Image (cartoon, coloured by chain):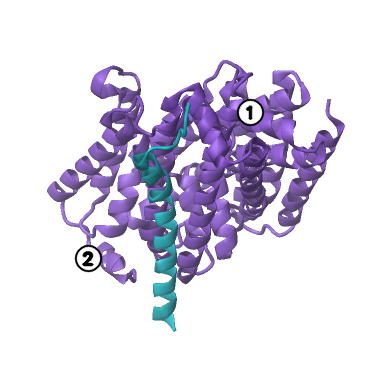
Chain colours: A cyan, B purple
Amino acid sequence: MENATLSAATWFWLMVPMPLVVVLSLINLLIKKGRSE
Amino acid sequence: MNAPTLTTFIIYLIVLISIGLFFYLRTRNLSDYILGGRGLNPWVAALSAGASDMSGWLLLGLPGAMYAGGMNNIWIAIGLSIGAFLNWQFVAKRLRQYTEVANDSITLPDYLENRFNDTSRLLRVISAVVILVFFTIYVSSGLVGGAILFESTFGLDYQIALWVGSLIIVSYTFLGGFMAVSWTDFIQGTLMFLALLIVPIIVIQNLGSWGDVVARAGEIDPEYLDAFSGMTLLSIISLMAWGFGYFGQPHILARFMAIRYAKDTPKAQMVGMTWMVLGLFGAIFTGFAGIAYFANSPLDNSETVFISLVQLLFNPWIGGVLLAAILSAIMSTVDSQLLVCSSAIAEDFYKQILRKEAKRQELVWIGRISVIVLALIATSLAANPESKVLDLVAYAWGGFGASFGPIVLLSLFWRRMTRNGALSGMIVGAVTVIVWKHLSGGFFDLYEILPGFILCAAVSIIVSLIDKEPSADIQAQFDSIKN
């Protein structure tokens, strides 16, 4: 097998949705902090 | 028997039981025992919610599925991450506030009764029955997982391993109640997190690089590299539908109710989601790297991939700590579920139906005795080593998600919802899951949580709209909850 790699679609689904929920949680935290100050 | 591993396990278990004893001396009433008097800081609440949620599935099931099938198993992790995020984002804070306003409710059945001002007790009793049925099955599946771990690590007989594990878990749940469970969950969550970060890094390093892992897995079967191989739209939806389960899991919702201040929820959410997503990645990469590591000598049981890698790659002392993380994962879920069941018996049956005048200490003891009785039933159910752990987990997860999920969401966000709407939706959700589980082929291969969730929501809405509008008091209470 030469240069076996994960397909672009697999990389996308592996690396985008899960980190995205962490980023959204961070944004939520910053917004709430900003409002309370 | 491996002496360093055994020593590590024993030290670890002594620490857990000491925590139980510490909180035993500080438990004054049922609210302390069940909810810790709403005193969880955001870190403990977040890790405790995560650890009690994830069970052995994160260290045995998901790496095992990745090892057996490759990348097409990421969908369940994606579905769970999205579900957990939505639960924290929309349910956590509002549920924390509403349960306090609704007559200081400390359990899910308690909340539902107070939310709808249900004097008939029907809502409380039916929801407590759903909790007892599904959690007894859930707990027994956890005990099976623990027994398999003891059996494979120490070569113990299955039945002895089962009873030893059950005795340890019951000891500290019995003693310390919610605070002990939440603090041990916190320690267990930390240990799981470290194990899931360290193991994949060491395995990948051992194999060369990530590129080498992918190349070797691709040599064995290129389908391992494709998230869509062998998948249909139905199967992807089915796996992602696990995320719907979050809105109705009583042991996770209990953590939301127990956060010290409602304003702490965004911080707890951040901690909880980071823990969960990094943990899921650790499990995914461990299982996937296992394909390359065991390329020449495949494992008989795919779910032992994490255990096997730890035993082969780590010093036995460190290995003992990492294997204790698996025990942590199982125990932290089982203890939380036992506690919710004991609260259902003490609070929802004993106090409300049998002895209304029961004193606080009496209820604490009823809760404790319930833990023992339920653990005995669950251990007996687990005594058959042929039990399929993951099937039972999926069943219980689906049952809760479909019975309580839509009810919790609608009760928090829809003023017009009525008691009859909640009651009928809950029954329809539970029955749909049970019936769907026994059907198979074509459309019926869809995970039962999805049809159960949809029908529960639909019936709740329709019945509520047909029903008389909720009283002015109930609507005023709804409006008093801050957004």
Q: Nearer the viewer, mark 1 or mark 2?
A: 1
Say yes or no: labels 1 and 2 on the same chain.
yes
Query: Which secondary structure lies at badge 2?
Result: helix
For the point 47% across and 65% down, which residue is it?
B265
Identify the subunit bearing mark 2: B
The residue at the far left in this view is B466
Residue named by callout 1: B376
The image quadrant that residue B428 belongs to is top left
Q: Using residue B349 as the reference point, say whether residue B87 is left or right of it.
A: left
For the point 84% across and 38% down, which residue is it?
B7
Residue B412 visible in the picture = yes
For the point 50% across and 46% down, which residue is it?
B251
Give residue B480's position: percent from left, percent from top: 31, 71
Q: Amino acid at mark 1?
A: Leu
Nearer to the camera, B436 or B47: B47
Image quarter hosting the C terminus of chain B:
bottom left
The image quadrant that residue A26 belongs to is bottom left
Residue at mark 1 to residue at mark 2: CA–CA distance: 46 Å
Nearer to the camera, B16 or B404: B16
Residue named by callout 2: B472
Residue neighbourhood size for the residue with mark 2, other residues' Cα within 10 Å, grouped as few (<14), some (14–19), many (≥20): few
Q: Earlier in the sequence, mark 1 or mark 2?
A: 1
Q: Using residue B469 as the reference point, say whether residue A9 is left or right of it.
A: right
Residue neighbourhood size for the residue with mark 1, other residues' Cα within 10 Å, grouped as few (<14), some (14–19), many (≥20): some
Give residue B410's position: percent from left, percent from top: 28, 52
The image quadrant that residue A22 belongs to is bottom left
Give residue B151's position: percent from left, percent from top: 71, 23
Give residue B193's position: percent from left, percent from top: 61, 49
Query: Which secondary structure lies at badge 1?
Result: helix
- Establish if A6 lies above or below B94: above
Counting labels gives 2
